[in-house]
Image (cartoon, rainbow, N blue to C red):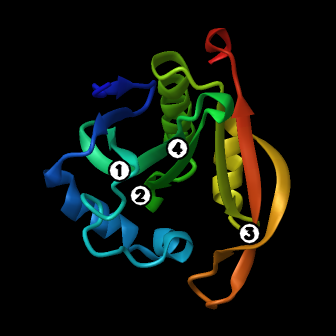
Amino acid sequence: MDAAELEGELVTLRPLEAGDADPLLAIHRTDAVSRWWGQPDAGFPITDEPGSVRFTILIDGRVAGMVQYSEEIEPDYRYAEIDIFLDPAEHGRGAGTDAMRVIVRHLVEDLGHHRVTLSTAVENVVALRCYEKAGFRRIGVAQAAGRNFVTGEMDDEWMLERVVLPSRV
């Protein structure tokens, strides 16, 4: 299914376009984002992860971030995993939470998933607050699961999930 624009209260999620690359790279390279995402891989955001579906987060028509998902499509284990980054200038204003709610609604109502997962560094309190406001719950800590791009060490990560039925999105 080709995705159309997805509307939230504060954000619009638009399928990634080539013209989004430069503003997304600029956001990705900010200290507040690169601390958790590292430096962009070659081809970001267009060709570096062919297994992911990406949406540009727009706020009032301006590129403000990106949300992506990948799917486990095996019928007995079907779920989606998501990740997001947002322009630090927009942190704390509800846009990240709105984007998370919009992508979950798309995954559940349009694509038929009932479970959505994500992970984040234990220290990433801004992201945790956003995810929990969007209805995700912490299900455990994976030890040494993600690279700390400041220290180079491996950090623990919270594993979170949101299990929903289409009528509960």
Q: Earlier in the sequence, mark 4 or mark 3?
A: 4
Residue placed under numbered mark 1 in the picture: 64
Neighbour tally class for label 1: few under 14, some 14-19, many 20 plus, Cα within 10 Å: many
The mark found on residue 96 in the picture is 4
Q: Amino acid at mark 1?
A: Ala
**In front of the other: 36 or 89:** 36
Q: Of helix, strand and loop, which one carries label 3?
A: loop
**In front of the other: 48 or 38:** 48
Determine contact: label 2, label 1, CB under 8 Å: yes
**In front of the other: 153 or 92:** 153
- Figure quadrant of residue 55: top left
Residue placed under numbered mark 2 in the picture: 87
Give the quarter of the figure containing the N terminus.
Answer: top left
Report the Cα–Cα distance between label 2 and label 3: 19 Å
Residue placed under numbered mark 3 in the picture: 123
Q: Earlier in the sequence, mark 3 or mark 1?
A: 1
Q: Of helix, strand and loop, which one carries label 1?
A: strand
Q: Earlier in the sequence, mark 2 or mark 1?
A: 1
Tell me how many marks there are.
4
> Where in the figure is residue 39, as x and y percent of width and height?
41, 78
> Where in the figure is residue 30, as x and y percent of width and height?
41, 73
Report the Cα–Cα distance between label 2 and label 1: 5 Å
Q: Residue at image x 56%, y 71%?
A: 36
Report the Cα–Cα distance between label 4 and label 1: 10 Å
